[in-house]
Amino acid sequence: MTESSTRKGPLTDIRVIELGQLIAGPYCGQLLADMGADVIKVEPPGSGDPMRVWGRGDYPLWWSVCARNKRVVTANLREPEGQQLVRELIAGADMLLENFRAGTMERWGLGYEELSKDNPHLIMIRVSGYGQDGPYSSRAGYAAIGEAMGGMRYLCGEPDRQPSRAGLSIGDTLAATFACTGALAALHHRNKTGEGQVIDASIYESVLNVMEATIPEYTVSGYIRERSGSSLPNVAPSNIYQCRDGIFLIAANQDTVFSRLAKTMGQPGLATDERFATHTARGRNAKDLDEIINDWTKSRSVDEVDRLMQEAGVPAGKIYRAPEMLKDPHFEARNAIVATPTDEWPDLKMQNIFPRMSKTQGEIRWPGITTLGAHNDEIYRNMLGKSDEELAALKARNII
């Protein structure tokens, strides 16, 4: 876990300084580290990133994923000496990643205009709730707010209940993924021109950009999408059905696929029934069709329905949780989940690096490191040339 550690992936020549905390910024850093970048995460001394204590179950294990492959140092960004340390790190970096409220970096003297004087090639990745400008830019913004403002929250859940959440911090991870995409595009531009630039990725706009045709549908015909629960409006059959021993998802909405489903159910006439013969007709009569399919599945086991669907070439699948993923042979064959044991967590497993690359695949070199400031000496001494005396003084003054 040193600077000379062998890193794999397409970004092994890239160094990223990661500021900020929680999910939206650090997940972008995780993606870059997964692709081989040397990500140096800066945390406040004493407390560190709150993600260190996040998670469910008996132990806070989220950190082990979101901080994997990162080197960790501490610096007090609220003090001039801490700001100067970070400025020195950034001067030798390719990218700076932050997810503070807009204006915070400028107040610390770490805005792009200042930093680019020392490093004109710098790519600054800025993730925030509302973006770096506009009337809402100074507001505090978490994923839930961005999901609501971007339109996703309104569509989640059952139609007769209040909007629900997705069960994951999808707004944060979407913003981080768009930020990463922008950073890689900026890197390509820099390779051609030598110019750095700023990536401005807001949570609400990241959500907005996956909202399909909701805006055009309203502007052209005044149509507003509503919550539809587990089904897709006007697309049938595509729903979760009750089996004898569990639930199962079937998506047979294409004409030829529905015909195969009807034959498998022993009711081939459904494919020519005027209520279900076309995509439009099935969408219009989705409730009746779902009842027919559910009557068929509920007397059969999940495994039986699964086997019949695969034999018929009907897209269908079980509803997985972590235990099912760990037992599934396809996950195992594609190495989708990997063992990442540590002294503290010998049974630790997590999702592998994705997407898979045929030439420059990254790897998980280590899970998130639990020791706060574990690389302070290594990085501040080797990269910035700080002496033992200087490091001791900085630590005594709570700068690191």
Image (cartoon, rainbow, N blue to C red):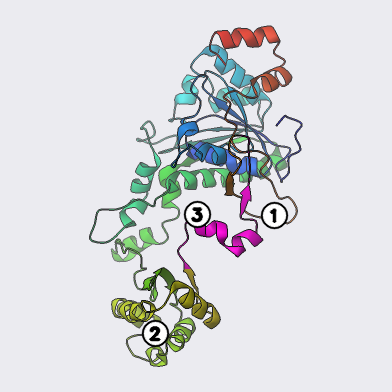
Q: Which residue is mark 2?
A: 278
CB under 8 Å between discs 3 and 1:
no
Q: Which residue is mark 3?
A: 322
CB under 8 Å between discs 2 and 1:
no
| Identity of the residue drawn at 49% across and 25% down | 105
Secondary structure category for the residue under label 2: loop
- Mark pair 2, 1: CA separation: 40 Å
Secondary structure category for the residue under label 3: helix
| Identity of the residue drawn at 24% across and 57% down | 161
In this picture, which residue range is highlighted in magenta? 318-343
Q: Which residue is mark 1?
A: 357
Classify mark 3: residues with Cα within 10 Å, few (<14), some (14-19) or many (20+).
few
Three-letter code, disc 3 = Ala
Residue 352 lies within the magenta run: no
Three-letter code, disc 1 = Met
Secondary structure category for the residue under label 1: loop
Q: Earlier in the sequence, mark 2 or mark 1?
A: 2
In the rendered image, the vertical position of residue 72 relative to residue 340, given as above or below: above
Closer to the camera, 317 or 220?
Answer: 317
In the rendered image, the vertical position of residue 270 relative to residue 239, given as above or below: below
